[in-house]
Image (cartoon, grey):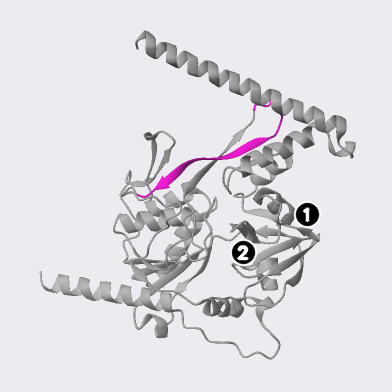
Amino acid sequence: MGWAQTNKTTHSMAQGEEGRYRSALLFANVVELVRDEYLEPEKTDYDKITYAALRGLLSSLDPHSQFLDPEGYAMIRTETEGQFGGLGISVGMLENQLTVNVPIEGGPAFRAGILPGDRIIKIDGQGTQKLSLGEAIRKLRGKPGVPVQLVISRLTEGKPMDFFLVREMIQVPTITDVSLLPDVTAKGEKIGYLRITQFGEKTDKEFDLGIARLEKEGATSLIMDLRDNPGGLVDEAVEIVSRFVPEKTMVVATEGRKGEAGRFEYLSKAVSRKIRWPTVVLVNGNTASAAEIVSGALQDLGKAVIVGETTFGKGSVQTVQPVDRSVAPAVAVRLTTAHYTTPSHRKIHGVGIEPDILARLTKGEEQAMYRSRSPGLKKAGEVEEVVTDEPLDRAVDALRGWKVFSRRSVSTR
């Protein structure tokens, strides 16, 4: 490195140090001004002011980055541990509004009839417009047995709706509805079906148990339903893909601000159970994050046909980084640090995974399917509506066509 380059680098570092000092001084001055002059001094505790400022800083970056105070940090550790006190609801920010992604089947919100896409206007009388996503989640969760009131806006309803719910200890299911499809749906084929509701710590074990059950029932092909799956643990997504591909196959990669230089690849693991059945994966617009990793990997690697509609497109990486305990004990930052890419280097974030076979349900059909499962959506005396699940039918057709092609290939050898 020449003298001119060295001098330029030193000058840049000096400017950086100067900028950091100036910013810290500005912040300190504003804090002291607030503490000296603000009308309500009980609101000017140093920690309260600093935490509020940091929440604003992190939320201004993107919807997924957030500052975690001691309560928030403790809460986030429960997200993937399989149970927590709350309403059984996954939420996100859509068009700057707190929006229901997916109600967890069987939970209080699901039983009450709350639907994906519902906008939460108020929580216990407080408007949600100025709440960060982390603050909103904290208000939704709480001790089991404690009630909470939600005001919901739904496009199909003329006015906001009130919901009175009671928080429960939520047991988060990951694998549900494991069975052979009925003959009338499977059209004579032995098609196994299972639904992954999200990717938690035990998903791989539950998946293996589900596959073992389907094997005993004589399944010869598989439909894996990832519709309305909001994601979860990336390691568990890798575990599921590992059941379909050879060991050390690249499943997904992360690329950060350094591009290829900072690229990290997740490789498939050695597993005792391998899936060799023809497989279809069902997805929709609520399929997100880890569920998109599974869909994209199986599609790229030629291990499954993807049926449904383009997925949500949540493919950014958040890492939870504790702050130095000598500075502030038990606080952390959840920060977006990278994007996920599929084995063929396709970016997921903001794009989603496009299906091989497009098939979708209308909003009315989706609501009818929820109504058939949720007690809160059934009206007294209402005749249950029969909804044709077109994506499932297309999945069955794909598997039947796959088998016909395989049989013909064998017969011509």
Q: Position of residue 252 (x, y in %)?
A: 39, 47
Pick out the residue farthest to the top.
Answer: 3
Type of the residue with mark 2: Ile
Q: Position of residue 405 (x, y in %)?
A: 21, 73
Q: What segment carries the magenta color?
A: 324-342
Q: Position of residue 46 (x, y in %)?
A: 80, 31
The front one of 204 and 133 is 133
Pick out the residue farthest to the left.
Answer: 413
Q: Residue at x 69, y 46 (%)?
A: 75
Q: Tell me which corner region of the image, top left, top right, bottom left or bottom right, holds residue 254.
A: top left
Q: Give the residue pinned by disc 2.
A: 104
Q: Is residue 313 left or right of residue 163?
A: left
Above or below residue 394? Residue 246 is above
Q: Is residue 339 magenta?
A: yes
Above or below residue 368? Residue 108 is above
Q: Which structural element holds mark 2?
A: loop
Q: Give the residue pinned by disc 1.
A: 143
